[in-house]
Image (cartoon, rainbow, N blue to C red):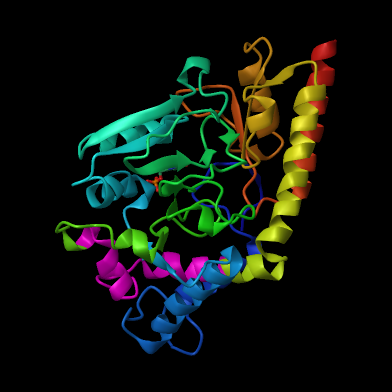
Amino acid sequence: MTTKHNFGAGPCILPPSVMEQAAKAVINWGDSGLSILEISHRSAEFESVILKTQLLVRELLNVPENYSVLFLQGGASTQFSMIPLNFLVGKQKAAYLDTGYFAQKAIKEATLFGEVTIVASSGDKGYAYVPDNYNLEKDVAYLHLTSNNTIEGTEIFDFPNSSVPVVCDMSSDIFSRKINVRDFDFIYAGAQKNMGPAGMTLVIAKNSFLETVGHPVPAMSDYRIFRDNQSMYNTPPVFSIYVSMLNLIWLKSVGGVEGIEAVNKKKAELLYREIDRSPIFTGTANVAHRSRMNVTFRTNDQLTEPEFLKFATDRGIVGIKGYRTVGGFRVSLYNALPLSSVEFLVQVMYEFAELKKD
Ligand code: PLP
């Protein structure tokens, strides 16, 4: 069991009770006499797991009836090409909002399939903000957004009221806050932040949007095939789906998305307050766009960063080093991270700042 304060960006942080149940199921799953790793995905037992997981997604995110919930593979990165392959091919162009590292990856893949318009970019300021003022042409097949920029530590809080279909990468903030699924035609997320172990990708798609695909698509990239086969066109990632189900049951037990959003707000506020108060740390994202899931900051002189990293590591804090291309610190506050860990980190930051006074 984890004995550290894990602020890592994944994969994958889960509550201790979920880890325990998952570990038990690897040895012996329920009354089956088998490990969860060896049961048939075509068994009635697993069919009820995948159905329950789907129902939990629907319930927790209030997914309307006219949307499909799919469990795919290949991570969110596969969606970067699968989305344009389905929805851009045969259309005029697609619009993308460039808000950072993962948005750029999505853009790069989309250009392989058709014309891409970048409606706005925050690259001019090192992706420290999210552009919210841009013109959208009417003839685009979709607008692609990244709701939370995991590396840069920015988040979109107001989604556009758009007349074109909105496609959103929610890999690092899905299930962390309430969303209105109706604002989107297509949502996708790698499981491994707030849902479950890596290996599964969640897709929530409006059925009418799926029907806009007018050309043949290879089976493994065809959303409609996964929809029509209850996400079991081929062998699904059984373990990832099973543990996601356990985790969503836990999420429901702590008040669902609304309940966890309140805790997530508290965690983020506590940490940003210390960053803003401290004479030695500075947040890197614009205040209005600060992410509640990934908090990015630096020491003012940057020279003391290795020293603070060691100071924190010696006290049982892990996973706070900033992304390799960005530097500084990135503290991830995913659902399963308790408020007490943030309180501890804030205390350690305070102690370090006091030391540096002398
Ligand atoms: N999009 C976002 C916002 C992410 O944070 C990540 C990974 O952290 C990805 C995409 C890539 O996901 P995957 O590793 O599942 O392909």
Q: Residue at x 41, y 48 (%)?
A: 167
Measured as percent of width and height from the top left, residue 143 is found at: 40, 41
- Residue at image coords 67%, 50%: 337
Q: Nearer the viewer, residue 96 or 14?
A: 96
Which region is colored magenta?
220-247
Q: Quadrant of the N terminus?
A: bottom right
Q: Quadrant of residue 357?
A: top right
Can I make out residue 34 in this image?
A: no
Foreground residue, 346 or 261?
A: 261
Q: Is residue 157 left or right of residue 145?
A: right
Magenta stretch contains residue 233 = yes
Foreground of the two, 255 or 352:
255
Q: Residue at x 74, y 45 (%)?
A: 265
Magenta segment, prevailing SS (helix, strand or loop): helix
The single residue placed furthest to the front in the displayed view is 138
Q: Position of residue 180 (x, y in %)?
A: 58, 56
Q: Position of residue 182 (x, y in %)?
A: 52, 58
Where does ligand 1 appear, by image quarter? top left
Taking 81 as reference, is 312 left or right?
right
Q: Is residue 293 above or below residue 325?
A: below
| Residue 64 is at least partly visible in this image | yes
Residue 186, by quadrant, is bottom left
Residue placed most toward the observer, 344 or 334: 334
Q: Position of residue 250 (x, y in %)?
A: 64, 68
Quarter of the view holding residue 199: bottom left
The number of numbered discs placed on residues in the rendered structure image is 0
- Left or right of 281 on screen, residue 127: left
The quadrant in which the C terminus is found is top right
- Residue 114 lies within the magenta run: no
Q: Residue at x 29, y 63 (%)?
A: 211
